[in-house]
Image: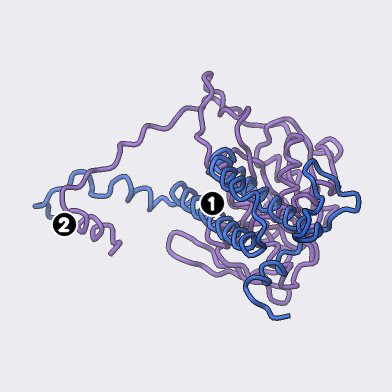
Chain colours: A purple, B blue
Amino acid sequence: MKILVPIKRVVDYAVKIRVKSDKSGVETANVKMSMNPFDEIAVEEAIRLKEKGIAKEIAAVSMGPKQSQETIRTAIAMGADTGIHVETDKELQPLAVAKLLQKLVETEKPQLIILGKQAIDDDCNQTAQMLAGLLNWPQATFASKVDIKDDKVHVTREIDGGLETLSMKLPAIVSCDLRLNEPRYAKLQNIMKSKKAQLNVLTPEKLGVDTTSHLSTVSVEEPPKRKGGVKVENIDQVVEGLKKNALI
Amino acid sequence: MNITIRNLAYIKYQPHSIPKNFSCHYSTEPIQGTKSDDIKLKNRIIVKDLYKQLLFLGRIGFLGADYIRERAKPQFMKNANLTDQDEINKCIDRTKYVIKEIEAMNRFHKYRSLKKSYDPEFQDIRDDFLNLNYNKNSNNK
C-alpha cells in the first residue's frame, strides 16, 4: 500500500509572529521555518503504518518555494521513502493545493492520504476536505486513532461531543489531530543521508493546474491583547475556580 | 568478555564508518605508553557526534543553538584531555542522558504550546479562570 503525505513549510511554532506594517501579511523573511507540527504527526503515523507492515511506500509532497525541499528532506530523514516538490513562488490557497494533489494522485496512485488537520500559519482546515470532494474519496478528519484492517480504515475522530469511530474502505483521506501520536526526532545520520536524496521536482504548469487564487487578503491585524490572568488571594478561590471549571 | 558498565559503554557506541583517508586538524598520533590511536579516534568521533546532536537539538527546539553552545562547549573543553577510558565513558553516558532530557523538553514544549493554541476549552479556562466577575454570594454555581 502506498501512502501520500502532503506537508507544509510554515513559520516555526515557537516564533513570536509579527504582522507587517502595511497589514498585508505576516513577517516571514529571516524567520525560522519548519514543518507544520500537524504534518509531523501525519508523517509519524505513516511511518508507524510502514513499520507495522501495512504500508510499503511513503511519498512526502510539498508545495512552495525552493526552501520547501528542506522540509521534504526532514520527512525523508524521519522515514519517508520518496519526496515530491511542486515548485511555485506564489501563495497557494487550500483549493489550489487540493487541485495539485488531485493531479498527483493520478500519477502516484496512493491508497491512503494522511495530512495534518490544519497549518499553523493560516489555520484553514480545508485541504483534506476539499481533496476528498475533488477525488470523491471518503474522509476522516481530526483523527486521534487510525487502524487499518483488511481493506478498511477505522478512524476515531475527536469531535465536540467526544469521540466518534468511523470505518471506510480504502482509498481514503485522513487528517490528523494533536493526540494521534508523538512524532519522532530524525537521527543526525538520517538527516545527512537525506541531504543526498533525489527529489522529484514539478511545477503547477507541468501538472496543468491553474493555481490563481480567488481570494485576496484585505488586511491582517494583530488580535486584541490578552486581558491577563487574575491574581488569587487565597487557596479557597483556587479550589472554587477549579471546581467551577469541572477540573476537580 | 564480561559485560560490565565500563565496557558496555564502549561496545554500544559503534561509530559510523571511519573513512580510510581520515584526516583532521588535531593530531591522531598515539602518545607513548597509552591507548592505541584506533580507540582514541573512535572516542573523538563519538564525542564529536554527541556534540553535533546537542547543537542540532538546540537548533530545531525552542532553546536555540546559542543557548546550548554556551553551556555545552565549556563542559566539553573542560574534559578534553581525559585519558582514562572509564572517565570518558562516564562523560559519554552523561551527555546521552542530557540529550534525552533536551529531546523530552522539546517535545513537551511543542505539545503544550499546540494544546494552548488549539484547545478552545483550555483557552477559555485559562483567561477566565475565576469568571472575572467572581462573586462569593452569586447564585449560579
Residue type at tag 1: Asn
- Is the same chain shared between marks 1 and 2? no
The residue under label 1 is: B106
Residue at the left extreme, as displayed: B137
Describe the element under mark 2 as helix, strand or loop: helix
**What is the distance, in whole Å, between disc 1 and disc 2 at their CAs?**
34 Å
Q: Quick check: B141 left or right of A71?
A: left
| Whether residue B9 is situated above or below residue B53 in the rendered picture | below
The chain to which mark 1 is attached is: B
Where is residue B40 drawn, in percent x and y? 76, 57
Between label 1 and label 2, give the one nearer the viewer.
Answer: 1
The chain to which mark 2 is attached is: A
Describe the element under mark 1 as helix, strand or loop: helix
| Residue sitting nearer the eye, B36 or A133 | B36
Where is residue A107 drawn, in percent x and y? 85, 52
Q: Quick check: A99 left or right of B53?
A: right
| Residue sitting nearer the eye, A201 or B38 | B38
Residue type at tag 2: Asp
Q: Quick check: A131 left or right of A2?
A: left
Q: Residue at x 83, y 58 (%)?
A: B17
| Residue sitting nearer the eye, B88 or B64 | B88
Where is residue B9 drawn, in percent x and y? 66, 68
Where is residue A200 drawn, in percent x and y? 85, 46
The residue under label 2 is: A236
Q: Residue at x 51, y 67 (%)?
A: A164
Image quadrant where residue A57 sits: bottom right
Look at the numbered discs 1 and 2 and tell me whether their residues touch, using CB distance below 8 Å: no
Let me know if residue A123 appears in the view: no
Label 2: few (<14), some (14–19) or many (≥20) C-alpha neighbours in 10 Å? few
The quarter of the picture where the N terminus of chain B appears is bottom right
Let me know if residue A213 appears in the view: yes
